[in-house]
Image (cartoon, rainbow, N blue to C red):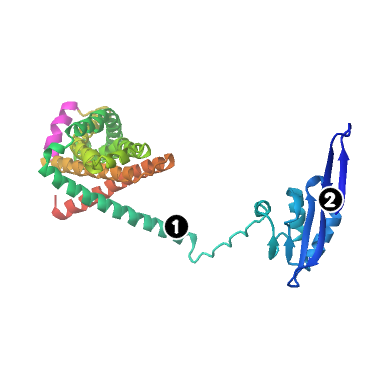
Amino acid sequence: MAQVESASEDGAATIRINSPSLSAGREADGRGVVRVQGDWSLLPLREFFEPLAAQAAALASNCERWDLSLLDRLDNAGALLLWGAWGKKLPADMVWRPEHQAMFSKLVVSAPPRPQKRRMPPSVDAFGRDLLLLVEHLLAATRLLGQLALDCRHLLRHPSQIAWRDTSAHIYRTGAQALGITALVGFLVGITLSYLTSRQLREFGADIYVINILGLSVWRELGPLLAAILVAGRSGSSMTAQLGVMRVTQELDALSVMGISHTIRLVLPKMAALSIAMPLVALWTSGMILAGGMVAAHATLGLEYQQFIDGIPAVVPEANLWLGLGKAHVFGLLIAFVACHFGLRIKPNSESLAIGTTSSVVSSITVVIIADAVFAIIFQELGI
């Protein structure tokens, strides 16, 4: 084996470098073996790189067993030389040290997985995943509903465990604090609806019937529905975000450790509060819609305020008021239930919190509209 000697300027030190070499031989069993010896690092290899690369490639085609145990040093330069001679794959039989295995393992690149052929079009596949997700949500909502029923029975036997203070606080947040935005939106909607209606009625000389149209549509349909949509976007998202933050900060896990039920302590107070506050908010919103309609009717048709106020009770049966309040009560329960359902499903990360809050608002509004359509069909069949 060739050796290279180098001395410092004062002759005090001598560095002995074993030059890299390859030797072919045979094992006791007759198999050919290539022994890699010397220093296979960048400095010694720079003078022998091309001859060693050609020699290694020639030996790799004849010998499957390679012995690296006699190496003095091996760095990335030597490993890349051998890797290229082997055809970028490890020989079938290797004798090497653990540090060599770690070095060559970095060079082994697994083949990219073959893309699986889709059996269905992407649109059908996406529809299937969405359908499975819907089924999963329905099953989870059913479990939550069953747990709420069990907790209600438990609270009937132990009324001292009812969270009265939390319920009162939620009534204030979802009811009193929502009066401002519902009043503004309701008043503007009333002005718009009255203005558009009055323009059509004026052409037929039926100006006075603007009271009938506004009264019937607002008390029975528009008021509760508009209030529910506003509350779903404002209070429903707040409920979902609150439960989601409690999941992220592990407060829900702490309640479970202390043996406190999530539904009794968190879900039921929200549902009870919103079911109480929602009819009042719907009544307030309906009143503001009629106030806006009255102002627009006075400006466009010249109807007096007192005439408008006196005409409402005459053209709107009292049953419509109670139907609207009953629908608002159901809307409140649905909004709180959907908000808590999505809040409890949030995972402990910020991305899930954002997605869950958005899904909660969209689902709440969708459920409210579906419920309103169901009520309309039922009332139509009953002749109410």
Q: Is residue 356 visible?
A: yes
Name the residue tied to disc 2.
19
**First in sequence: mark 1 or mark 2?**
2
Q: Residue at x 79, y 46 (%)?
A: 42
Seen from the viewer's position, the closer of residues 161 and 201 is 161
Query: Is 71 situated above or below 287?
Result: below
Return the residue found at the far front.
12
Name the residue tied to disc 1.
126
Q: Position of residue 327 (x, y in %)?
A: 19, 44
Kindly identify the amino acid type of the residue bearing the numbered disc 2: Ser
Q: Position of residue 370 (x, y in %)?
A: 27, 50
Kindly identify the amino acid type of the residue bearing the numbered disc 1: Ala
Quadrant of the image occupied by residue 195 = top left
Seen from the viewer's position, the closer of residues 182 and 68 is 68
Which residues are the magenta region? 304-316
52 sits left or right of 303 in the view = right
